[in-house]
């Protein structure tokens, strides 16, 4: 059995197929999940990766042998699993996916009732320990499961977030990256008047064009070039399991996730004035400022979908956004979606009647961001302490997630990676030269360069 303990991450299961995780390991995870949480009925879906059908069958068999009824929702995007668990009133679900990882990976995103994520501090490590003790079973080609098509109900739900009649025939380049967006979007696009330039819509787990991770600049080059070539109004790129979308404006410039969060917060607050908006500690001041300007209540939170979803429930927040491109909606099981933000952006651009670059101009002229800068360090805790001491007296210090320093005209967050000895710096200032100065100062501390002892 291939089930390397290190495939159990902070928020999901992910490893190389078949050396770190194979079908027998997947069987053990499926069975351990059911034995640990004792759900009566769960949904199991899968993405388009080459290994996903076999891994999904193994999870189904393990879950069934563990005593659960299994609903097979087929080849879907991750957000569709979250939707299906809520829509079908199930006790949980497993999405077989390795998200944006390269083609050799497989994995699973696991949820409980209400699409609540099972992560490192909410039961995933218990599943890991239990799975290690499960003996492999002879796998069969047709494990017991009831097939259900959730596509029609999903399409209706995501379209309910916008006024379809307000959407104009914008020219939009969509890069599905040979991932699940290529299967999910066609029935939605059929209902919209947009002129969609469809790129790499054929789901293909070998990813023949580029890896399905638009956060990496090399994977954005295509959509940026295509937007310029087509003179499109905007571009949208999706990750592999399509639960994240990324935007490029009409000039071909990439839009940071916190600016997207600010625009979406504005859109959502128009629909429900006075609502609460969740944003992560890394985000631009654009987010709380826009939320307050539009009568909302901005609430800062730790990074990570498990923490955001928990806070969404606790606060009854309407919307939440992360710099990494995860956007969460109260009326979508408090879950993240890649499709809904894309629809909201099309609606917003249509209603404003301005190019996306114009909608972003106030942000770009006021807020200057470093983006995330990762630095390996030998001692994470020591380095965080050094940062705290270095910036003491310059601003308010918070330990909500790593170290945050908030001064009058700049702020930073430095937080450790979940999986490796790295520090991640995000910094913003209200002037470009101040951003560069403070960025270099923070990096000098992190990298131990030129500091006076």
Image (tube, rainbow, N blue to C red):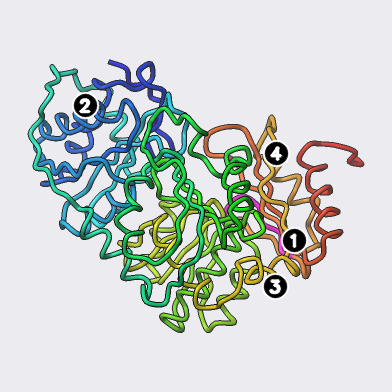
Residue 231: image location, x then y, percent:
61, 57
405 magenta-colored: yes
Q: Nearer the viewer, mark 1 or mark 3?
A: 3
Is residue 309 found left or right of 222 in the rendered image?
left
- By secondary structure, the bulk of the magenta-drawn segment is best described as strand
Q: Is 375 above or below relative to 235?
A: above
Dot placed on the residue nearer the N-terminal end, 4 or 3: 3
Task: Name the residue tied to disc 2.
Answer: 27
Circle 3 residues within 10 Å: few <14, some 14–19, many ≥20: few
Circle 4 residues within 10 Å: few <14, some 14–19, many ≥20: few
Residue in the picture at 50% in, 58% down:
172
Q: Secondary structure at mark 2?
A: helix
Q: Quadrant of residue 36?
A: top left
Task: Name the residue tied to disc 4.
Answer: 382
326 magenta-colored: no
Q: Which residues are magenta?
A: 401-406
Task: Name the residue tied to disc 3.
Answer: 362
Q: Calculate the distance from the C-alpha at mark 2 to the C-alpha at mark 3.
A: 52 Å
Asked if labels 3 and 2 touch by Cβ distance under 8 angstroms, the answer is no
Dot placed on the residue nearer the N-terminal end, 1 or 3: 3
Dot placed on the residue nearer the N-terminal end, 2 or 4: 2
Residue in the picture at 23% in, 53% down:
151
Q: Secondary structure at mark 1?
A: strand
Circle 2 residues within 10 Å: few <14, some 14–19, many ≥20: many
């Amino acid at each position: 059995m291939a089930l390397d303990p290190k495939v159990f991450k902070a928020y999901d299961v992910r490893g190389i197929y078949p050396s770190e995780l194979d079908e027998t390991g997947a069987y053990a995870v499926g069975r351990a999940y059911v034995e640990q949480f004792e759900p009566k009925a769960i949904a199991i879906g899968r993405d388009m990766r080459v290994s996903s059908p076999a891994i999904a069958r193994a999870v189904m068999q393990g879950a069934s042998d563990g005593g659960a009824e299994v609903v097979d929702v087929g080849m879907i995007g991750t957000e569709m699993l979250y939707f299906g668990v809520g829509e079908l009133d199930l006790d949980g679900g497993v999405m077989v996916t390795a998200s944006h990882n390269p083609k050799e990976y497989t994995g699973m995103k696991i949820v409980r009732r209400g699409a609540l994520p099972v992560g490192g501090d909410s039961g995933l490590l218990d599943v890991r320990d239990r799975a290690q003790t499960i003996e492999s079973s002879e796998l069969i080609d047709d494990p017991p499961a009831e097939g259900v098509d959730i596509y029609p109900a999903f399409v209706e739900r995501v379209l309910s977030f916008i006024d379809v009649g307000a959407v104009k025939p914008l020219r939009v380049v969509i890069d599905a990256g040979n991932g699940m967006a290529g299967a999910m979007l066609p029935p939605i696009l059929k209902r919209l008047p947009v002129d969609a330039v469809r790129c790499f819509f054929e789901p293909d787990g070998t990813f023949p064009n580029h890896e399905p991770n638009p956060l990496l600049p090399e994977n954005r080059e295509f959509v940026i070039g295509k937007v310029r070539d087509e003179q499109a109004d905007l571009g949208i790129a999706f990750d592999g399991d399509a639960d994240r979308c990324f935007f490029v404006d009409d000039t071909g410039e990439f839009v940071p996730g916190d600016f997207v969060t600010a625009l979406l917060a504005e859109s959502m607050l128009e629909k429900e004035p006075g609502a609460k908006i969740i944003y992560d500690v890394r985000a631009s001041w654009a987010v709380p400022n826009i939320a307050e300007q539009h009568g909302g209540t901005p609430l800062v939170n730790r990074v990570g979908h498990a923490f955001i979803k928990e806070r969404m429930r606790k606060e009854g927040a309407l919307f939440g956004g992360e710099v990494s491109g995860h956007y969460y909606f109260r009326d979508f099981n408090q879950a993240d979606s890649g499709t809904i933000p894309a629809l909201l952006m099309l609606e917003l651009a249509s209603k404003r009647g301005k190019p996306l670059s114009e909608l972003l101009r106030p942000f770009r002229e006021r807020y200057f961001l470093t983006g995330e800068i990762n630095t390996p360090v030998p001692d994470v805790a020591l380095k965080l302490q050094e940062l705290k001491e270095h910036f003491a007296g310059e601003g308010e210090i918070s330990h909500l997630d790593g170290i945050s320093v908030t001064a009058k005209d700049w702020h930073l967050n430095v937080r450790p990676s979940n999986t490796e000895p790295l520090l991640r710096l995000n910094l913003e200032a209200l002037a470009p030269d101040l951003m560069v100065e403070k960025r270099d100062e923070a990096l000098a501390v992190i990298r131990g360069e030129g500091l006076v002892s």
